[in-house]
Image (tube, rainbow, N blue to C red):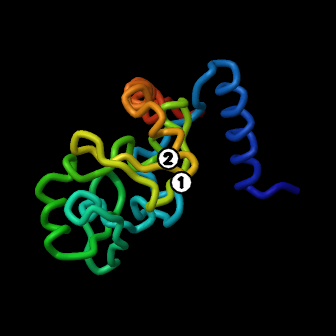
């Protein structure tokens, strides 16, 4: 006998795959912020401000947090926490912290916090160093494609 969860999840998953396959797009909405690796915590607990101010990734601390866009953001310093609180849109990574190259290809993927670039003041994260190389081959083209794809990815209607 199937558990209640299995009876609910299996039809949702199969229905989502079918709708996605038929429509050529995602079958359910992507969370607006990547909390894939650490549930509820944005971008694996890395400090988004540190990329801008320190020029390198820095692990945040669980004791320094801000709630924004349905996720908990961690910070390496009280100063970075205050900067983010004052202007989260300025410091948060593009596309909710999902891999920018994947979004350009109309899908999502987790990130490696060490694979990043800042272009015109915007932080872009990538899945891995090898994907970052692909991203860097045509940054303007990938940004354009990702900006076109992101609204469809994050706003896709969930399968009911």
Assess disc 2: are there few (<14), some (14-19) or many (≥20) residues with their C-alpha within 10 Å of its C-alpha. many
Note whether residue 150 is visible.
Answer: no
Q: Residue at x 23, y 53 (%)?
A: 91
Q: Residue at x 40, y 44 (%)?
A: 32
Measured as percent of width and height from the top left, residue 101 is found at 49, 39
Q: Is 99 placed left or right of 74 in the picture?
A: right
Q: Is residue 112 left or right of residue 70?
A: right
Q: How many marks?
A: 2
Residue 114 position, x and y percent, is: 45, 61
Residue 18 picture quarter: top right
In the image, residue 6 lies at what x, y percent? 75, 53
Which circle marks residue 129 in the picture? 1
Q: Is residue 62 visible?
A: yes
Query: What is the secondary structure assignment of the residue under circle 1?
Result: helix
* Image: 150 above or below 126: above
Q: Secondary structure at mark 2?
A: helix
* Structural distance between the alpha carbons of marks 2 and 1: 5 Å
Q: Is residue 4 above or below residue 102?
A: below
Of all residues, the one furthest to the bottom in this rendering is 63
At a point 28% along the width and 51% down the height, the residue shown is: 92
Q: Which mark is residue 132?
A: 2
For the C terminus, the image quarter is: top right
């Amino acid at each position: 006998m199937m558990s209640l969860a299995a009876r609910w999840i299996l039809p949702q998953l199969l229905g989502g795959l079918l709708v996605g396959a038929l429509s050529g797009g995602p079958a359910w909405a992507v969370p607006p912020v990547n909390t894939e690796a650490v549930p509820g915590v944005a971008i694996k607990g890395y400090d988004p401000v540190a990329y801008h101010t320190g020029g390198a990734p820095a692990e945040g601390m669980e004791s320094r947090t801000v709630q924004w866009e349905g996720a908990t953001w961690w910070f390496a310093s009280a100063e970075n926490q205050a900067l983010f609180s004052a202007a989260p849109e300025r410091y948060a990574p593009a596309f909710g912290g999902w891999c920018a190259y994947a979004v350009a290809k109309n899908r999502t993927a987790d990130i490696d916090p060490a694979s990043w670039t800042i272009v015109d003041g915007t932080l872009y994260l990538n899945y891995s160093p090898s994907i970052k190389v692909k991203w860097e081959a045509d940054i303007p083209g990938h940004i354009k494609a990702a900006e076109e794809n992101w609204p469809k990815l994050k706003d896709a209607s969930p399968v009911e």
